[in-house]
């Protein structure tokens, strides 16, 4: 049967994202610092940020951009990204955010598929941006380089060209329930990247769903290292933190020393991370050199975090650590544990191995992937594993120009089939086991890579690890293969046999690692997901 969110229902106003975030800004809050660029030290108040957003929207409108248009946004985290993103939406257009690591070929694919008519970027990414813009036929004036020399110097407008004119934002009319605000790209449960159609209502709903659970206040300083172009950073940081009138301490990319230094210098109260950062926080000796006492909470998402690793981070840093779960198609948060574990709202505490409960105004199901039978929450303990399904106001409108993929993902009852394998306990708390498509089938048994990765990461001489299924050349069967990164100090003697023996001592026989390769780094996406296709 379906199990509903245990949290109180929330109101989801029928407004644009801009109005939801900023329309009720008070004079006191207007003078609060909204954005801090850690590289330059520049600070932007809410008043100045909104003025820039309005001016950006006015400049886009003067260039013919409005309702029905798509604008590409290719940039790392910065205050300028925040202004550009919300300026695009304020103009009535749709923002298709592009991975800052993309090649020109990748950018061309996304701009072509989304039918973008303008591209916004920054100087470090200009070579690939310009190549892509030329490939799809964008004029120089339609390629905005936020930190560039300007229109008169190289033909590309910069931020000053757009903002200095201080044009008023346009009066635009659209239905927030159907009008697309953002168009990130995701592979979904299978296949090539697809445009995820997120409406203003989707984004407003997800902020409304998570705000009571995050507990952010105006006094909080949130470290923003997760990329804004990714839906995790876009919603949880760029939107939810601004709705709370908190301060975003912005990092353009992850560097452990800078990450730790920014927490110490800016007295950050919360950090949102992916599991690779948790590995560093648990194991790297650099952590001991910084005062991280201001941190009250860390949330990990984008991939499952092992309980022992999470406990090691929480104990070492001395603050709460919880998990959340989501995907681009869910705007993205569908399950979360509050920073107090759930004590205040639910009177219980989510185990660290769980990703928490279904967000408000939504319901979940767990379905046997073989039989299609629903798996009920148990009276005690954990349920059997099955595919996680979700239904709520944050479910995407569908995949752009891909009705077949949409129908494969969202069923006739409105449930989105996540492609993730999960269990549920008696309170409705959900535990992610692994990706359905990533499960390794060994002699008919299902072997979750995440489980083996957690075991590997518990080894003191292993800095990072990933597991995939590969074909055994002798038997032709799929077997688990571990890719291992050794700790920089004292791990030279670690052998393939030692790694396999270590895992074998802790798992069932059919789950044993049967091949090992030592590599310098595990390939991961900007959000921290292991790029298993690269390992394959």
Image: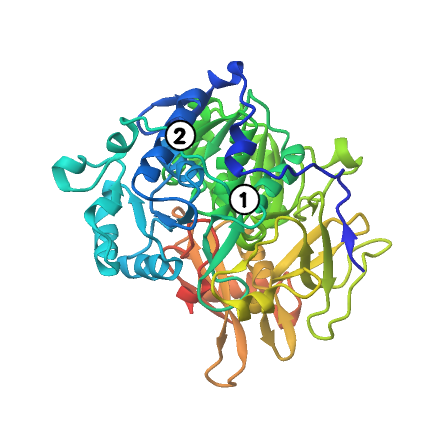
Give left or right: position of 492 versus 40. Answer: right
Q: Is residue 389 above or below residue 405?
A: above
Q: Is residue 531 above or below residue 171?
A: below
Number of labels in the image equals 2
Q: CA distance from mark 1 to mark 2?
A: 17 Å
Q: Is residue 133 above or below residue 356?
A: below
Give left or right: position of 95 versus 214. Answer: left
Q: Which one is in front, 234 or 523? A: 234
Residue at 52% over, 18% down: 29
Q: Position of residue 131 (x, y in %)?
A: 21, 55
Residue at 64% over, 29% down: 215
Q: Which one is in front, 197 or 441? A: 197
Residue at 41% over, 32% down: 250
Task: State the mark number for residue 410.
Answer: none
Q: Position of residue 58 (x, y in %)?
A: 35, 33
Which residue has dot 2 on it? 54
Residue at 62% over, 39% down: 14
Under tag 1, what secondary structure? helix
Q: Position of residue 292 (x, y in %)?
A: 50, 26
Tell me the quarter of the image containing the C terminus. Answer: bottom left
Which residue has dot 1 on it? 200
């Amino acid at each position: 049967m379906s199990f509903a969110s245990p949290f109180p229902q929330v109101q989801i106003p029928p407004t644009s994202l801009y109005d939801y975030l900023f329309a009720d800004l008070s004079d006191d809050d207007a003078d609060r610092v909204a954005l801090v660029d850690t590289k330059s030290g520049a600070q932007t108040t809410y008043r100045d940020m909104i003025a820039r957003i309005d001016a950006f929207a006015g400049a886009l409108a003067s260039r013919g951009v409005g309702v029905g248009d798509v604008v590409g946004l290719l940039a790392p985290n910065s205050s300028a990204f925040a202004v550009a993103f919300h300026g695009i939406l304020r103009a009535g257009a749709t923002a298709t955010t592009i991975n800052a690591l993309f090649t020109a070929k990748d950018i061309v694919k996304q701009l072509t598929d989304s039918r973008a008519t303008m591209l916004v970027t920054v100087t470090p990414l200009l070579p690939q941006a310009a190549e892509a813009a030329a490939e799809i036929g964008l004029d120089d004036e339609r390629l905005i380089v936020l930190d560039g020399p300007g229109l008169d110097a190289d033909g590309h407008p910069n931020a000053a060209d757009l903002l200095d004119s201080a044009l008023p934002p346009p009066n635009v009319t659209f239905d927030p329930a159907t009008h697309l605000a953002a168009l990130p790209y995701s592979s979904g449960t299978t296949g090539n990247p697809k445009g995820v159609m997120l409406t203003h209502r989707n984004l407003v709903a997800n902020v409304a769903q998570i705000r009571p659970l995050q507990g952010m206040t105006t006094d909080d300083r949130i470290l923003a290292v997760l990329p804004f172009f990714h839906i995790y950073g876009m919603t949880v940081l760029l939107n939810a933190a601004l709705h709370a009138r908190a301060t975003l301490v912005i990092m353009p990319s992850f560097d452990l020393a800078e990450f730790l230094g920014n927490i110490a210098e800016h007295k950050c109260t919360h950090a949102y991370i992916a599991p690779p950062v948790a590995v560093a926080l648990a194991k790297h000796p650099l952590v001991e050199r910084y005062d991280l006492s201001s941190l009250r909470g860390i949330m990990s998402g984008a991939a499952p975090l092992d309980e022992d690793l999470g406990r090691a981070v929480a104990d070492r840093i001395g603050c709460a650590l919880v998990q959340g779960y989501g995907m681009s198609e869910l705007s993205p948060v569908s399950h979360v544990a509050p920073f107090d574990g759930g004590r205040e709202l639910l009177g219980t505490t989510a185990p660290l191995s769980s990703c928490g409960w279904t967000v408000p105004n939504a319901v979940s199901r767990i379905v046997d992937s073989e039989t299609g039978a629903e798996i009920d929450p148990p009276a005690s303990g954990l349920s059997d594993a099955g595919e996680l399904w979700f239904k709520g106001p944050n479910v995407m409108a569908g995949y752009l120009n891909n009705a077949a993929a949409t129908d494969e993902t969202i069923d006739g009852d409105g449930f989105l089939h996540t492609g993730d394998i999960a269990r549920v306990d008696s309170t409705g708390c959900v535990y992610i086991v692994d990706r359905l498509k990533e499960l390794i089938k060994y002699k008919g048994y299902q072997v979750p890579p995440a489980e083996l990765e957690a075991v590997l990461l518990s080894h003191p001489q292993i800095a990072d690890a990933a597991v995939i299924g590969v074909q055994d050349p002798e038997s032709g069967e799929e077997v688990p293969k571990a890719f291992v990164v050794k700790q920089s100090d004292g791990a030279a003697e670690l052998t393939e046999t030692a790694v396999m023996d270590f895992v074998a001592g802790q798992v069932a026989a059919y789950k044993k690692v049967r091949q090992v390769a030592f590599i310098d780094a595990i390939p991961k996406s900007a959000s921290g997901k292991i790029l298993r296709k690269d390992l394959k």
